[in-house]
Image: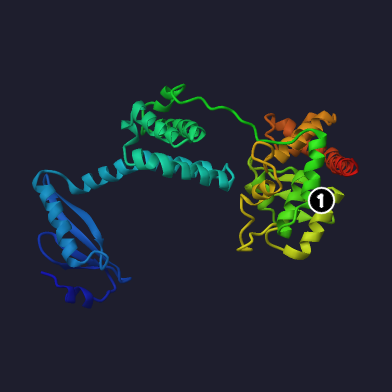
């Protein structure tokens, strides 16, 4: 029988060698110093082997316990090696395992924040209840029960998103041979309908002018002030503005190129910068430049401004969530630009909405950038006019 002292004293040789314990247990010592527990057994007249772990992670006492567990299986006519493979396969077929596999596959096609939010939804609501279940055994009523618990937390939209995403996971499981049908499809119409509510935004000219005047009068952190002033001029998505980096911005070339990795549609987006936008950024460059985040966090400059920074500023200015949101700057620009008669395609391109026709999309991006430059400068001048009109009233 082996002892811990013998094991610790064992030195690697030129070739692998074995230190035998008893009842089929031995330690394989490799030339690189690795020590692997092995169990040798016979079943149906054939000699087989089973790995029991690495020493010292698995000490001698635990290795013997694992050997005894394997011997009991052999005595019952069960192959411990085949059983282990079956257990691993079962773990790979759980709802959580398949979901994480699908989420990882989709991660490359989505913005990081979108992928993270997807994973957080599953970790918070579905993995705790269904994660360990083999995906093929989950029934429609069980998934519905889990989703209704989400609804009872007041998260109706989240419940609908989870149903839709679960459907994609079940279809992926079908394609990979781990499920036979999409039970999420049976739940269409089973959840409380979502009441669609657009992002609150001010769209009438007088209201826009008053908002711009309030922004100019806002007193707070310089980065927050600059972000507030820039938001209506560039009307990008909140995350795209918050995470802007100086290396993306060419002030002399009056252009901001947002990399594909940060865009919802995973394509590089060009934002022509008006004279007004360049002036705001030049003032800020001396404070937060020349590299890193344009709008760094207050507590940690290595992180971007928080998601709530501009929302909180709007609230301090007296605008409620039913009147104006950070995302509302996009609705504000879209509505006003369309009313002014700019080509819808040009507006949609600048909003970075998905162009379904890929050929048309390539043509638009190549041929309509100059139109977008003129539109963005005209838009900035129009906002100045609205602000002055309010000031003079």
> As displayed, is residue 368 above or below residue 140?
below
Front residue of 67 and 65: 65
In screen coordinates, is 76 left or right of 141?
left
**Camera-side residue of 38 and 297:** 297
Say whether residue 316 is visible: yes
Instruction: Locate residue 184 relative to residue 381 in the image: left or right.
Output: left
Identify the residue shown where x is 27% and y is 70%: 15
Residue at mark 1: 277
Q: Is residue 363 visible?
A: no
Occupied quadrant, residue 247 = bottom right
Q: Tag 1's secondary structure?
A: helix
Report the side of 204 relative to 385 (left or right): left
Residue 212: percent from left, percent from top: 80, 45
Q: Is residue 377 above or below residue 18?
A: above
The image quadrant that residue 184 belongs to is: top left
Of the 4 image quadrants, the one containing the N terminus is bottom left
Q: Residue at x 69, y 37 (%)?
A: 323
Q: Position of residue 22 (x, y in %)?
A: 10, 63
Q: Quadrant of residue 16?
A: bottom left
Identity of the residue drawn at 61% across and 63% down: 299
The C terminus is located in which quarter? top right
Pick the residue in front: 385 or 134. 385
Numbered marks: total:
1
**140 left or right, relative to 384:** left
Residue at image location 89% in from the left, 44% down from the top: 388
Count residues near mark 1 (Cα–Cα under 10 Å), then give few for <14, some for 14-19, many for 20+. many
**Residue 189, horizontal then vertical, whole percent:** 46, 21
Q: How is the image coloured?
A: rainbow
């Amino acid at each position: 029988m082996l002892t811990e002292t013998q094991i610790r004293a064992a030195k690697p040789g030129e070739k692998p060698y074995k230190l035998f314990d008893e009842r089929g247990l031995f330690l394989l010592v490799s030339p690189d110093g690795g020590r692997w527990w092995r169990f040798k057994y016979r079943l149906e007249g054939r000699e087989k082997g089973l790995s029991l772990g690495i020493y010292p992670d698995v000490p001698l006492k635990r290795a013997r316990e694992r050997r005894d567990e394997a011997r009991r299986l052999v005595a019952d006519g069960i192959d411990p090696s085949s059983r282990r493979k079956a257990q691993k396969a079962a773990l790979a077929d759980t709802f959580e395992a398949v979901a994480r596999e699908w989420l990882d596959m989709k991660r490359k096609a989505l913005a990081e924040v979108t992928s993270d939010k997807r994973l957080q939804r599953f970790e918070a609501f579905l993995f705790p209840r269904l994660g360990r279940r083999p995906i093929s055994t989950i029934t429609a009523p069980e998934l519905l029960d889990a989703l209704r618990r989400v609804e009872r937390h007041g998260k109706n939209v989240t419940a609908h998103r989870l149903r839709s995403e679960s459907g994609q996971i079940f279809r992926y499981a079908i394609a990979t041979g781990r499920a036979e049908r999409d039970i999420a499809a049976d739940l269409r119409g089973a959840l409380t309908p979502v009441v669609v509510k657009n992002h609150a935004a001010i769209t009438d000219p007088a209201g826009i002018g008053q908002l711009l005047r309030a922004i100019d009068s806002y007193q707070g952190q310089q980065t927050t002030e600059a972000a507030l002033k820039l938001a209506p001029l560039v009307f990008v998505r909140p995350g795209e503005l918050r995470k802007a980096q100086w290396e993306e911005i060419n002030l002399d070339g009056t252009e901001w190129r947002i990399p594909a990795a940060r865009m919802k549609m995973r394509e590089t987006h060009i934002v022509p910068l008006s004279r007004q936008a360049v002036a705001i950024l030049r003032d800020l460059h001396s404070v937060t430049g020349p590299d890193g985040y344009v709008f760094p966090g207050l507590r940690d400059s290595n992180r971007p401004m928080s998601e709530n920074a501009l929302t909180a500023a709007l609230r301090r200015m007296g605008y409620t969530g039913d009147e104006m949101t950070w995302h509302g700057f996009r609705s504000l620009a879209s509505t006003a630009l369309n009313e002014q008669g700019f080509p819808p395609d040009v507006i949609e391109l600048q909003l970075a909405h998905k162009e379904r026709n890929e050929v048309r999309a390539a043509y638009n991006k190549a041929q309509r950038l100059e139109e977008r430059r003129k539109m963005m400068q005209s838009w900035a001048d129009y906002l100045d006019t609205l602000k002055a009109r309010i000031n003079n009233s």
